[in-house]
Amino acid sequence: MPFFGNTQFKVLSVITCFALGGTVFISCLFITERDPRHDRPPPTDEMGMIAFFKQTYRSARRLSPQIRKVCEVQFFNWIGWFPFLFYITTYIGQLHVNPIFRANPDMSPEEVDEAWESATRVGSFALLIFAITSFSSNMLLPFLVVPTYRAPPPAKGTGSFHSSPCNHRIGNQPTTPSGTPLPMSASMTSFFPPPPDEASHSRLTRLLSLAQIPWLTLRRAWILSHLLFALCMFLTFFITNPLAATILAGVVGMSWALSLWAPFALISAEISKRDALARKTGGVNDDQAGV
């Protein structure tokens, strides 16, 4: 693909951008959200850029204990992950060239460069195994882990998830309490479609629940991923060949998958709980702006 760039890295970067844009576009098309027109309008004194940063600062200072603990764990988690992500190819490449240099101490500069080129390919292959394992784990683990948060069913007479106690609906169109239809453009109806069929949704939920491991909650899975990562890093003291290091990198991919998913899912679940409670009591959830 020469039109993407003149190096493999440039081509890979362009392909990655297209893949990221495509997945985000699909998410925007198929993931439905609660209609924000049913929310109360924000206070006028909280509008503007300065007010936004003030609200963010206040929310960060008043984080719930659960969200604060997740952030603290994730801080130290990244301290452990950055050396691995930056130096895993160097580590595996060094394991590859060590026996070559010991067996041939008088190598020419060209032979040394050739050995390091081979070591780079070995390290890149290990990262490929790491990425494949991480991708597979991200696809499989959500079906095995018990959901952290389930949205409460809508109250009787309030409609579906897309409706609100303070608004009524005529068909799929929300109205004011007096019965006046609220205006809906074509873009609004596409972004806030009618709720899915409840019977088919319940059948799919029961089918997916069969694959779940009852004791494997998201918190426990995240803890196990930390323990697995710590064990793998400890084993690096005893690994002496690139094949074992490549297998190790593949195993670590499972921990990386949880690190990219679990903390954000836990924070989202906590925000959803607090948001549902705030809507139930008629209050305002301030924590969302700071997370």
Image: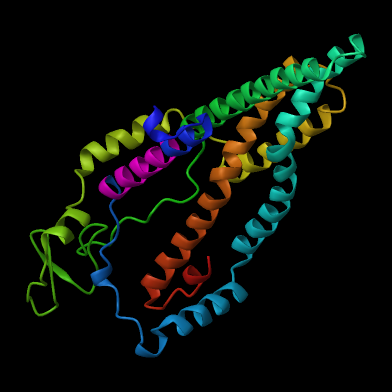
Residue 19 sits inside the magenta stretch: yes
Please name whichever residue, 167 or 51, is drawn nearer the observer in this view of the structure: 51
**Residue extending furthest toward the bottom:** 45
Q: Main secondary structure of the magenta part?
A: helix
Q: In front: 187, or 228? A: 187
Q: Would you identify the image quadrant in which residue 81 lies?
A: top right
Q: Residue at x 18, y 72 (%)?
A: 167
Give the residue furthest to the top: 103
Horizontal side of residue 117 vs 167, given as left or right: right
For residue 4, side relative to residue 68 (left or right): left
User: Residue 237 placed where, x, y %?
Assistant: 87, 28
The residue depicted at 22 percent of the width and 64 percent of the height is 158
- Tell me where residue 177 appears, x and y as whole percent: 14, 78
Q: Nearer the viewer, residue 96 or 207?
A: 96
Image point (58%, 40%), residue name: 258
Magenta residue check for 207: no
Q: Residue at (28%, 59%) from the top-left corner?
A: 154
- Residue 216 appears in the figure: no
Range of residues picked out in magenta: 15-29
| Screen quadrant of the N terminus | top left
Q: Quadrant of residue 248?
A: top right
Q: Is residue 123 above or below residue 75?
A: above
Vertical relation: 237 (above or below) 261: above
Q: Where is residue 157? Give x, y as percent.
A: 19, 64
The location of residue 137, given as percent across then percent down, is 53, 30
Decide if residue 286 is in sight here. yes
Which residue is at the front of the view, 36 or 212? Answer: 36
